[in-house]
Amino acid sequence: MKRPIAELWGTGRYTPKRVMTNDEFSKILDTSDQWIRERTGIRERRVAGPDESNACMAKAAAEQVLQDTGITPLDLDALVVATCSPDRLLPSQACDLQALIGAKHAAAFDVQAACTGFLYALNVAEGLVASEQAEHVLVVASEKLTSIMDWSDRTTAVLFGDGAGATLVRKSTDGRGMLSSYMRSDGTLAELLYRPGGGAAHPPSEELLKDHSYYIHMAGREVFKAAVLSMADACDKALERAGLSAGDIDLLIPHQANIRIIEATAKHAGVPMDKVYVNVDRYGNTSAASVAIALDEAVRCGRLKPGMKVMFCAFGAGFTWASLVVQW
Ligand code: COA
């Protein structure tokens, strides 16, 4: 099928009010602002409060998209939420969001591809538009990771943050939209980054809470290596499939996990850092929401303008990775 089939129309985001600095972590963990900044590029992150559920953040981001586009909730045919930290395990986060915004005519479901979730969800949305199952697909990425991270583990706690971002996918107009996309995963690497307990194999128990297996576990150094390789592969494939070279890309919006991974990705892809959108310093890693939040910021601050070509790439637990080139 000839691309572009679908375009991204309108953006939105929500980031929690509470800002937590590295210095605050150094008061509760054996860490320092200097260590965190040098190894990750993170200075601060947002931490959602009790009144900022995954659904509330998703709703706030979604409402901005509806405002941007003039689409009403009743016009939505599908609602796809990318998340790995839903408010509850059943039903989906998307169904709870659907009820909150009153998208009565939509099909609603979640996509779980961890930090790659937003890009996977955009691919699913493109498929729904291509098959004419849906005219308007709202794609929301929302995470409350601080509720599933181990606050006593310095190797993971300092990395993550909360927030949500969103966009709408519809049929391409005037040649705008997704020029190429690529999705991959490797389930043999699952245990590099995972939550061992809490699912059907190890249901909630006192034991599980005591041994911290309810929380995110990560082999940081191995994840770093896999991330650099998969982000490089993602950029190569998205460019190749679009028939473009790095010089054609006006803006690269990578998953915001670590500034060193972002720099390695940009270097491999041949995109100079002044064409790379970075906000990991302010939000840390917000998993699926990371690219979606960065996209909304880039649009609202004028870094991403109509006519530009933007490349997105992300990696995450699974292992999963993906990329997209979009004519904005
Ligand atoms: N503060 C201070 N010291 C810390 C620390 C922290 N927050 N976290 C780990 N350390 C220590 C380690 O315990 C280790 O100490 P040791 O040498 O005495 O054993 C030392 O720092 C080096 O640890 P290492 O894991 O080798 O550091 P690193 O340079 O690889 O950086 C990460 C660690 C986690 C920042 C890095 O590996 C990374 O970013 N990995 C990818 C993570 C990621 O992106 N996850 C999300 C995927 S979507």
Image (tube, helix red, strand yellow):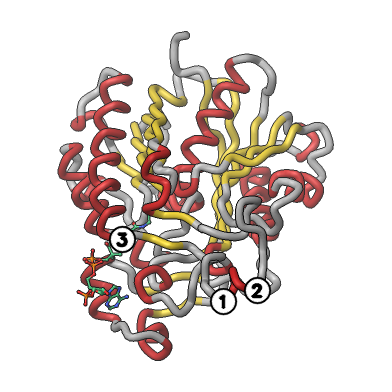
Find residue 189 and report its horizontal and vertical position in percent.
37, 44
What's the residue at 65%, 48% (across, down)? 62
Q: Quadrant of residue 241?
A: top left
Question: Where does label 1 land, which residue?
Answer: 210
Question: Of helix, strand and loop, which one carries label 1?
Answer: helix
Q: Amino acid at mark 2?
A: Glu
Q: Amino acid at mark 1?
A: Lys
Pointers 2 and 1 in contact (CB under 8 A)? yes
Q: Is residue 99 above or below residue 203?
A: above
Q: Quadrant of residue 147?
A: bottom right
Question: Where does label 3 land, which residue?
Answer: 220
Q: Is residue 311 above or below residue 243?
A: below
Q: Amino acid at mark 3?
A: Gly
Front residue (pair 128, 62):
128
Question: Where does label 2 land, which residue?
Answer: 206
Find residue 274 and report its horizontal and vertical position in percent.
21, 50
Question: Of helix, strand and loop, which one carries label 3?
Answer: helix
Residue 299 showing in the rendered view:
no
What's the residue at 34%, 36% (across, down)? 311
Give how far apart the Cα atoms at labels 2 and 1 are. Answer: 6 Å
